[in-house]
């Protein structure tokens, strides 16, 4: 079950990756709904699976492990996906803004807001070209970042299924793939 919910979140990221510079909110909404639903519906079962994997006397350890995994996952997710977005933006902008003054291009590559500020300073056709290139480069970087996130979620879903199968082979009474381990028949946390 957790794996399917991770795939739902990946599908939402895939939908968001199709957006362009002129996309409206109504085109963004389905991606947000799918991603949010997938993540929200997978969080509680994942927490339950972590906590149920240890006996009652070790629940503090399970809770700490759960907190650590969420915090570390969030930090690494922001770092990795943010780096992918930034690298894509900088590369696409450098490619699209050939012929710009070197100093202007360097400032524009700092962020989309910086690029739009430089474009206003340049003005005219050159400024309009830079503003357009910056918006397109940002969307390109966002596309790469969202697809990377979707791939990570799909790999996590596959890993969840494989781990659940391995667990069910060791403990035939355990629940179907992706269910929390606490649903094992005849066992309690204190066993």
Image (cartoon, rainbow, N blue to C red):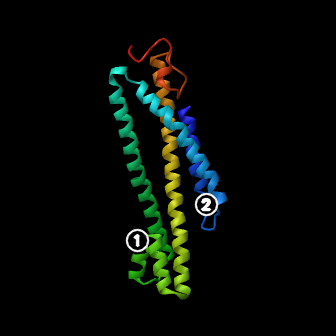
Q: Which mark is residue 110?
A: 1
Disc 1 secondary structure class: loop
Which quarter of the picture shows residue 106?
bottom left
Camera-side residue: 106 or 2? Answer: 2
Real-space Cα distance between discs 1 and 2? Answer: 22 Å
Position in image of residue 122 (x %, y %): 48, 86
Q: In this view, does 145 lie above or below 152?
A: below
**Label 2: few (<14), some or many (≥20) within 10 Å?**
some
Camera-side residue: 106 or 33? Answer: 33
User: Which numbered disc, 1 or 2, marks the residue that appears first in the sequence?
Assistant: 2
Position in image of residue 185 (x %, y %): 50, 14
Q: Which mark is residue 19?
A: 2
Quarter of the figure that contains the N terminus = top right
Q: In this view, does 59 lie above or below 4?
A: above
Q: Do the residues labelled 1 and 2 touch (CB within 8 Å)?
A: no
Disc 2 secondary structure class: loop
Q: In this view, does 17 lie above or below 122?
A: above
**Label 1: few (<14), some or many (≥20) within 10 Å?**
few
Residue that appears at 55% across and 38% down: 41
Quarter of the figure that contains the C terminus = top left
Camera-side residue: 45 or 171? Answer: 45
Position in image of residue 151 (x %, y %): 51, 47
Residue that appears at 49% across and 37% down: 43
Residue that appears at 53% across and 26% down: 177
Residue that appears at 52% across and 29% down: 178
């Amino acid at each position: 079950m957790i794996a399917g919910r991770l795939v739902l979140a990946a599908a939402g990221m895939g939908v968001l990756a199709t957006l362009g510079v002129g996309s409206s909110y109504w085109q963004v909404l389905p991606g947000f709904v799918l991603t949010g639903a997938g993540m929200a519906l997978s969080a509680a079962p994942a927490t339950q699976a972590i906590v149920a994997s240890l006996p009652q006397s070790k629940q503090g350890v399970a809770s700490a492990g759960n907190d650590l995994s969420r915090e570390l996952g969030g930090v690494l997710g922001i770092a990795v996906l943010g780096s992918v977005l930034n690298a894509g933006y900088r590369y696409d902008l450098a490619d699209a803004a050939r012929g710009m003054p070197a100093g202007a291009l360097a400032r524009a590559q700092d962020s989309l807001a910086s690029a739009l500020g430089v474009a206003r300073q340049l003005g005219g056709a050159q400024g309009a070209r830079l503003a357009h290139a910056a918006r397109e480069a940002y969307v390109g970087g966002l596309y790469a970042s969202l697809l990377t996130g979707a791939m990570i979620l799909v790999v996590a879903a596959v890993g969840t299924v494989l781990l659940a199968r391995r667990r069910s082979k060791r403990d035939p009474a355990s629940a179907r793939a992706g269910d929390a381990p606490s649903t094992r028949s005849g066992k309690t946390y204190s066993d």
